[in-house]
């Protein structure tokens, strides 16, 4: 059973602006002149924990949204057999009390980031708390966000043996289930490399992923155009292509991208091919300012999508 406690100290995670940004784009786009447009509708073991908190919650408490301030951020580490290294998993929870039965939104970071830096980059602790408070009023599903280290793998199995997909399926989800979270149906969110990764995860596991929110997904039309190291070979690129594919059955999509982003054209293409029910294609570039501006609408989208999967009370 996983307990969450709010803390003022954790606000430093969201308040920190990390200088480094995801480096998937082959060219750095200019800073946005404004935020994105509003939505257009169309294993075992828990590792070592490092959490912060000043309040306590008893195991019998039902989940209650923090009344003010940011969400609690708790980091654990474990040895990933699938990735062949120690990785961090960061749980961002805007609730006080036991989290048993709550839904999960996986957070897949961009290239050059990791789980903890990604949470800080977007101010996810503050944004998720705001989304949870708004969701409680609107009746959308409560959920926690879970980020995990994916390295620079582009979130797919690599020739080196590094396999972040297997890590998610065989190591991360069982750990979350052991802690009481509901992992049979979930959402995936990511930006840049992670936006592509979230789309790919839904394509390969539509029985698991019900919704994807992707910011500036790093995708290319041909293997020769990809960023260095993104794929092992042309065959690897083809085997893990998202562009040109129909929507995965049962998955709903939201795609956001700034008009100055080098991935703008492919993001528009993907939104059409995947029949995205929400999009945000406003002013902005391939940078944290755009991704942070898009985040509230994306979290609301995730909450609405997960509400359809939540168990109904008898």
Image (cartoon, rainbow, N blue to C red):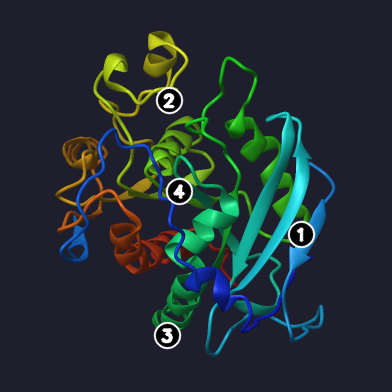
Marks 2/1: CA–CA distance: 33 Å
Image quadrant holding the C terminus, namely: bottom right
Badge 4 marks a residue whose secondary structure is: strand
Which badge, 4 or 3, comes first in the chain's sequence? 3
Mark sitting on residue 137: 3
Residue 257: x, y in percent?
A: 24, 50
Which badge, 1 or 3, comes first in the chain's sequence? 3
- For disc 4, the marked residue is 210
Badge 1 marks a residue whose secondary structure is: loop
Marks 4/3: CA–CA distance: 23 Å
Which badge, 4 or 2, comes first in the chain's sequence? 4
- For disc 2, the marked residue is 230
Query: Residue 275, located in which quarter of the rendered image?
Result: top left
**Residue sitting at the far bottom:** 67
Q: Which residue sits at x=21%, y=65%?
A: 35
Badge 2 marks a residue whose secondary structure is: loop
Marks 2/3: CA–CA distance: 42 Å
Which badge, 2 or 1, comes first in the chain's sequence? 1
Mark sitting on residue 179: 1
Dot 1 surroundings within 10 Å: few (below 14), some, or many (20 or more)?
Answer: some
Dot 3 surroundings within 10 Å: few (below 14), some, or many (20 or more)?
Answer: few
């Amino acid at each position: 059973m996983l307990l969450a406690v709010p803390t003022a100290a954790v606000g430093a995670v969201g308040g920190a602006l990390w200088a480094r940004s995801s480096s998937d784009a082959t060219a750095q786009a200019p800073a946005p002149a404004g935020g994105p447009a509003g939505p257009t509708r169309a294993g075992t073991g828990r590792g070592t924990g490092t959490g912060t908190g000043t309040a306590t919650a008893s195991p019998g408490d039902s989940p209650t949204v923090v009344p003010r301030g940011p969400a609690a951020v708790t980091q654990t580490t474990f040895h990933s057999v699938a990735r062949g290294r120690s990785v961090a998993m960061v749980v961002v929870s805007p609730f006080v009390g036991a989290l048993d039965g709550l839904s999960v939104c996986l957070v897949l970071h961009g290239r050059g980031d990791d789980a903890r830096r990604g949470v800080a980059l977007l101010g996810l602790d503050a944004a998720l708390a705001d989304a949870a408070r708004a969701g409680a009023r609107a009746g959308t599903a409560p959920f926690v966000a879970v980020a995990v280290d994916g390295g620079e793998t582009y979130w797919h199995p690599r020739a080196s043996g590094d396999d972040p997909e297997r890590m998610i399926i065989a190591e991360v989800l069982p750990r979350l289930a052991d802690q009481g979270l509901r992992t049979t149906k979930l959402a995936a969110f990511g930006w840049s490399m992670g936006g592509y990764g979230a789309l790919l995860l839904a394509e390969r596991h539509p029985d698991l992923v019900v919704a994807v929110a992707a910011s500036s997904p790093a995708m290319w039309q041909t293997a020769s155009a990809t960023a260095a190291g993104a794929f092992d070979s042309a065959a690897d690129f083809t085997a893990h292509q998202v562009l040109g594919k129909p929507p995965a059955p049962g998955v709903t999509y939201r795609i956001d991208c700034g008009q100055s982003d080098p991935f703008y054209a492919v993001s528009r293409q993907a939104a059409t091919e995947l029949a995205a029910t929400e999009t945000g294609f406003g002013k902005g570039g391939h940078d944290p300012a755009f991704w942070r501006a898009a985040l509230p609408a994306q979290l609301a989208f995730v909450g609405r999508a997960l509400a359809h999967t939540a168990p109904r009370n008898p």
